[in-house]
Image (tube, grey):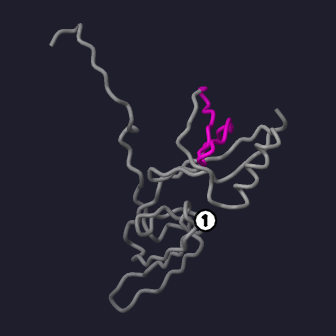
Amino acid sequence: MSDSEEHHFESKADAGASKTYPQQAGTIRKNGYIVIKNRPCKVVEVSTSKTGKHGHAKCHFVGIDIFTGKKLEDIVPSSHNCDVPHVNRTDYQLIDISEDGFVSLLTENGNTKDDLRLPTDDSLLTQIKDGFGDGKDLVVTVMSAMGEEQICALKDIGPK
C-alpha cells in the first residue's frame, strides 16, 4: 500500500459507545433511568424488600417507557447490576413540518435533521402544529436513548 491511496470510511455509527451502562440495582432511585424488558424507562417507583433467611434484598422497579409511555415493572436483587440507558436531550430549531408527519430540524452546526417524526402525544402535537402555523420560532427538545429519538418538549422563542 502506498501513501498516496486515500481511505474513505463511512461514519454512520457513533464511537462504538454502549447504549447502556451497568449500575447496581440498590443505587437506582426514583426519577432515574433503567432498562426494563429492553426498553429505556424513567423510574417512577422503587421499593426494596428485606432479605429472606438466605437471600438478597430485592428492588421492585416501576418505570414508564420514555418513548411509548407504557408502564413496565421489574424485580432485581439489589446487589445485581441493572442496565441504565444513556439518555441525551438536544434542542433543535424547527424549520418545517412535512405532509407525511416528519419534521425538519436545524442542528447547531447548521445542518438539517429530517429523520424525526412528529410526537404521538396529542397536546404536544397540537402545540407544535399550531405554533408552526402561526409562524412562531419554535425550539423542540429531542430525547434520545438506545438508538431511538423522539420530540419530548417545545419552547417558543418568539415570532419570526
**Magenta stretch: helix, strand or loop mostly:** strand
Residue 3: horizontal and vertical position, in percent? 22, 9
Q: Residue at x 76, y 43 (%)?
A: 132
Q: Secondary structure at mark 1?
A: loop
**Relative to 34, residue 105 above or below:** above
Q: Quadrant of the C terminus?
A: top right
Q: Which residue is mark 1?
A: 31
Taking the view exactly as shown, the residue that stands out farthest to the front is 99
Quadrant assignment, res 93: top right
**Relative to 111, residue 61 above or below:** below
Q: Is residue 92 magenta?
A: yes
Residue 107: horizontal and vertical position, in percent? 60, 33
Residue 39: horizontal and vertical position, in percent? 45, 63
Q: Residue at x 71, y 41 (%)?
A: 139
Give whichever of 128, 35 is nearer the camera: 128
Residue 12: horizontal and vertical position, in percent? 39, 35
Left/right of residue 143 with respect to residue 133 in the rendered view: left
Taking the view exactly as shown, the residue that stands out farthest to the left is 1
Q: Residue at x 38, y 38 (%)?
A: 13
Give whichever of 13, 130 is nearer the camera: 130
Left/right of residue 22 with respect to residue 33 in the rendered view: left
Quadrant assignment, res 97: top right
Residue type at tag 1 = Asn
**Relative to 62, residue 153 above or below:** above
Taking the view exactly as shown, the residue that stands out farthest to the bottom is 53
Give whichever of 5, 52 is nearer the camera: 5
The residue stretch that appears in magenta: 90-110
Quadrant assignment, res 1: top left
